[in-house]
Amino acid sequence: MSGGGEGDTVSMASDLPFLGPRQGMELQEYSRKQRHPRVSRTLGEFLQRVGDSTVDNNPPSHRVFEVDRDSVYQPASMPFVLSFHNLTYSVKVRRKIISSCFRSLAIGSSGNLMEGKSGTKVLLNNISGEAREGEIMAVLGASGSGKSTLIDALADRISRESLKGIITLNGEILESKLLKVISAYVMQDDLLFPMLTVEETLMFSAEFRLPKTISKSRKKARVQALIDQLGLRTAAKTVIGDEGHRGVSGGERRRVSIGTDIIHDPIMLFLDEPTSGLDSTSAYMVVKVLQRIAQSGSIVIMSIHQPSYRILSLLDRLIILSRGQTVFNGSPATLPRFFAEYGHPIPANEDRTEFSLDYIRELEGTPGGTKSLVDFNKSWQMKNPRISHTNGPRLSLKDAISASISMGKLVSGSTNVDSNLSSSVPTFANPFWMEVLVIAKRSTTNSRRAPELFGVRFGAVLVTGIILATIFWKLDNTPKGVQERLGFFAFAMSTTFYTCAEAIPVFLLQRYIFMRETAYNAYRRSSYVVSHALMSVPSLLVLSLAFAAITYWAVGLAGGSSGFLFFLTFIFASFWAGSSFVTFLSGVIFNVMMAYTVVIAVLAYFLLFCGFFISRDRIPPYWIWFHYLSLVKYPFQGVLQNEFDDPSKCFVRGIQVFDSSPLRAVPDEIKLKLLESMSKTLGMNITSSTCLTTGSDILKQSGVADIDKWSCLWITFALGFLFRILFYFALLIGSKNKRK
């Protein structure tokens, strides 16, 4: 078990065999070293070097491989350069929240983040820059400066219709489809399954992102190499953990989040404040890992609030933003000269970034804002253009991607790149059926380690079944028994739907993990929907069997074994439809309490219109449509027909006809005389044994004879499938991960 800061300390002190030996004092050096004398191998190259040495039936959990440090990968020319020019993005704001006070501070000529008369807020204003392979570009700024917005813009998480400007990779316009394949995005929050271990989390990510052409043993070797690269060897067998389960430390959790997105060795890595909420040591270790990822042949772009001196020594390029505009763009080493030439030199005893951000914040509070600093940065950039260190001509995007794939980077199963870049690398690494199996395997692992949710549902069904069995014990075939049977069926069918409400948190707790994984094509949304549906079937079967077995014979329902099987099938169909309905709502409503409120209210309406409280014939015409929309109607109607479809069974004989009238208290002798009088009046012989009401009569009186029981069964199942399809479309529409 890895404690709070212990895991990070161990990671700092340990050597990373994947990356080659390290000097013991490397992490303690504060002075900046010359950048990139050697570049680390890609994960793919490392695995190619390893070859099939791990291909056996029982591979060891950890092996140390010797890597020749003098033959590490170093490109002859800079293959990947991400350039962005004049990025501008604004959003509309409501009139009522545009305060006149803020508007007086926002000066249009300064170009600062402002809310103008048009009701728009400028989040990015003509941002330009360049990020290169092997380097870390960090975006700095105070809260609200536009850091995350710029990262989202570069990662294609803003609608192209709303974002103005040009983004190119090696001089070619970057298409959204291609960007998803060659890049990864790490969110600010650590979205991980708490009951999986570090190794399992990365292994599932490998199974999603690595193609099926890579053997299981090589995927495991890749995970082990990544664990070493991330410095997570001591925490590999520790669960991620949450508020109720102790797990890895905050820094380790953040590195696991990064690992899940770089398992396929992407060309570009975007991170939204990866050091947020971490202590200085953990934050430094995270950025140190990012430096090694960059040196393995990736472009790393991240936002950071205020880096420490040690973290600053790891960064290659800084962009400092103020209210959506660039106030500095250059190497961290040039910050002192920049402010010295501007006329506000950084004091010798002050931290460079702390002084810069504090001074920018002071300027934002002045009438002129940061206009002078923005203008000075533009002129300073022209006087100090960035010098390219590439040897020879820059590679085209096609050639650069081909070279990276040939060296084992961007593992996608493709060995070459054709003229159509978007189609040369598969959109998804694995086929549909494999994605379904992996998702199902992960769900099974999570459910096995956190059985509380199913336990609560099973307990609720068990208790409800026992209560119903004891209340409606051995019902007879009298008129009272008929009414009690109707009440039992109505409550039983509604219970199957209400207990499904416990499944609301299942998807809501996984929603943001799902959005992160599908945003960059880890798997298809359809695979998730199918796997989610298949994984629900075993639990629904257990719940159905438990409920039916407890209540059927205890209540004394009709039909024998065949009747029980039909009753069981209808219970399962009800659970299926209810579970599908709740799943669909969880895909539409994102708040747990609101989802519970809506589910309970809608199910109450379904019960009201199912035909028990008021028969179909008595429902007003303007509400009859809701009767047919009621999910409870069809199983309720089906089990009633299953109970009362025996034509030889009688439920009202002779004097029992008075049991539901005020004459029920009259002595039987008088009731018999009344029957004789009725016989003479009606011209028919009615005795105490004459059958007056059969099962078909009850069905007609209840208004449940319009659809036969088999049709009700198929309709119930079909509604479950319908809601699963609607759930898919809800995910398709609601998980775009893009700003408008």
Image (cartoon, rainbow, N blue to C red):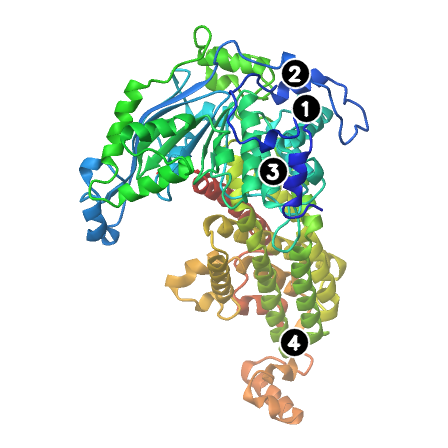
In three-dimensional space, the C-alpha distance between marks 1 and 4, rounded to whole angstroms, equals: 82 Å
User: Which dot, 2 or 4, sits closer to the camera?
Assistant: 2
Residue located beneath label 3 in the image: 256
Return the mark for residue 69: 2
Kindly identify which residue carries mark 4: 481
Q: Residue at x 47, y 12 (%)?
A: 398
Q: Nearer the viewer, residue 451 or 532?
A: 451
User: Which tag is nearer the camera, tag 3 or tag 1?
Assistant: 1
Which of discs 3 and 2 lies nearer the camera? The answer is: 2
Q: Position of residue 509 (x, y in %)?
A: 55, 50
- Do the CB atoms of the residues marked 3 and 2 lie less than 8 Å apart? no
Location of residue 38 with respect to 505 vertically, above or below: above
Q: Is residue 476 visible?
A: no
Q: Which circle's residue, 3 or 4, is located before the other in the chain?
A: 3
Q: Are marks 1 and 2 in contact (CB under 8 Å)?
A: yes
Q: Residue at x 32, y 40 (%)?
A: 359
Q: Are marks 1 and 4 in contact (CB under 8 Å)?
A: no
Q: CA distance from mark 3 to mark 4?
A: 62 Å
**Quadrant where the image shows the C terminus:** top left
Of label 1 and label 4, which has the lower sequence position?
Answer: 1
* Amino acid type, callout 2: Arg
